[in-house]
Amino acid sequence: MDATVEGKALNELDILRIMQMIPHRYPMLLIDKVVDIVSGESATGIKNVTINEPFFMGHFPQRPVMPGVMIIEAMAQTSAVLVMHTLGQSAEGKLVYFMTIDEARFRRPIVPGDRIQIKVTKQQNRRNVWKFRGEAWVDGTLCAEAVYAAMIVMDS
C-alpha cells in the first residue's frame, strides 16, 4: 500500500503542485494531475477532456476531436513535471522547449468525455536535454504516441 499525506498518494501530484512546477496556465495547461511518478524514469499524467476546452470551438465543431498537437503538448507537460520532480525545487518554473518530435502516430481520436492517461518514459538525458517516449491511452486503448526531445532553459 502506498504511503499517503492528507489522503493523497505520495507519488501523486495535484493541479496546484503541477502549477508550482511548470509555468503553463489556462488555456495551455493540459494535464490535471500526475500519478505513478518515478523520479528520473517515468510518470503518468491524467487529462480529463471536456467540451469546454477552447480548441473544440474551432476544431471540427460538428464532431469535436482533440488536436494531435495538443495531445503531444500534454505529453510534453507530463514530461516537464517529471523533469522538475527529478531536478528538484531549484528547477521548478523553468521553461522547457521542444527540440524534436519524432515517430508521432495518432491511432484513435480523443473526444470530450475521454480521460487520457499520458504515459511518459525518459529515454535519455544529457545535461539540459531530455528525450522521452510518450503514449496517450483512453480506456486501455493506445490513441497516440511520439518520441520527443526538450531542452530545459535553466536561466529563465
Image (spheres, rainbow, N blue to C red):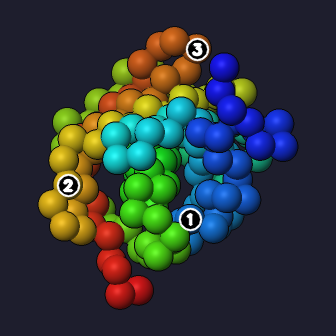
Rendered location of residue 48, percent (x, y): 68, 36
The residues tagged by marks 3 and 2 sit, at their Cα atoms, a distance apart of 31 Å
Circle 2 residue: 125
Q: Earlier in the sequence, mark 3 or mark 2?
A: 2
The quadrant of the image that shows the N terminus is top right
Mark seen at residue 21: 1
Pointers 2 and 1 in contact (CB under 8 A)? no
Q: Secondary structure at mark 2?
A: strand
Q: Secondary structure at mark 1?
A: helix
Rendered location of residue 51, percent (x, y): 74, 39
Mark seen at residue 48: none
Residue sitting at x 28%, y 60%: 150
Q: Earlier in the sequence, mark 2 or mark 1?
A: 1
Amino acid at dot 1: Met
Please, which residue is most extreme toward the right here?
6
Q: Quadrant of residue 123?
A: top left
For disc 2, the neighbor class at 10 Å (few under 14, some 14 to 19, many from 20) is some
The quadrant of the image that shows the C terminus is bottom left
The residues tagged by marks 2 and 1 sit, at their Cα atoms, a distance apart of 19 Å
Please tell me which residue lies in front, 63 or 104: 104
Rendered location of residue 73, percent (x, y): 44, 51
